Amino acid sequence: MEVSIIFKIGAVGILVSVLSQVLKHSGREEQAFLASLAGLILVLFWILPYINELFESVRRLFML
Amino acid sequence: MDVIRIAVLGFGGVLLGLLLKQCRPEYSFYISLAAGVCILLLASSKVQYLIESIQSIQSSLPVDTAYLNVLLKMIGITYIGHFSSSLCKDAGYASIAAQIETFCKMSMMAMAMPVLLTLLEVIQEFLG
């Protein structure tokens, strides 16, 4: 799970950009915006535990 | 051997970030953040070993443990400040990065001040 998150984020990014292009060309601007927003929030939820783990380990290591 | 792994991980992150920079710039920030976090988590075992060896060395030295803790804290603050400010610089926001670095410098000075005061007291004892 360590390294695969980078490629999962890349996959979500590509999928969202393709999806928003398709939605834009079919005339649904709002859905395209909502899709990209949803992709952003999804990736945020994925990455938050990692950031928390990072700051916890640095805090524990350096006795901050 | 794992240096090569880290390098390949970095290259993969950079290539993916470049790919996403045109169509979805916000994801390139996410990818650089994720790559940085992964590389540090892989490196934390080495840092752990370093800190344990420092502590074992320190037990033989007559140095007070407080000074060593201040030193370690400074290293931690430096690392997090540098990590976050360079990430902000990558995303193009140099002003926020500068703010983070200024804050880190001030907090380090604030932490170093007691050590400086004790040094001055020791000097005064010699002279006085």
Image (spheres, grey):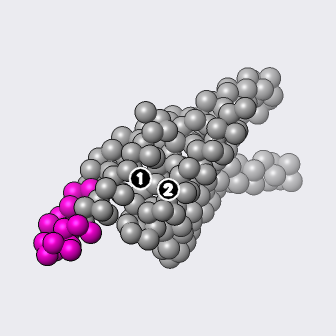
Magenta residues? Answer: A21-40
Q: How many C-alpha atoms fall within 10 Å of the one at disc 2: few (<14), some, or many (≥20)? A: many
The x and y percentages for residue B21 are 46, 67
Residue that sits furthest to the right in the current view? B127
> The residue under label 2 is which amino acid type?
Leu
Horizontal arrangement in the rendering, residue B29 relative to residue B63 (left or right): left
The x and y percentages for residue B47 are 65, 35
Q: Which quadrant: the N terminus of chain B?
A: top right
Q: CA distance from mark 1 to mark 2?
A: 6 Å
Q: Which residue is mark 2?
A: B16
Is residue A2 in the magenta section?
Answer: no
Q: Which residue is mark 1?
A: A10
Any part of residue B32 in sight: no
Element at badge 1? helix
Element at badge 2? helix
B40, above or below A14, in the image: above
- Between B48 and A35, the residue placed more toward the observer is A35
Instruction: State the residue at coordinates (27%, 56%).
Output: A39
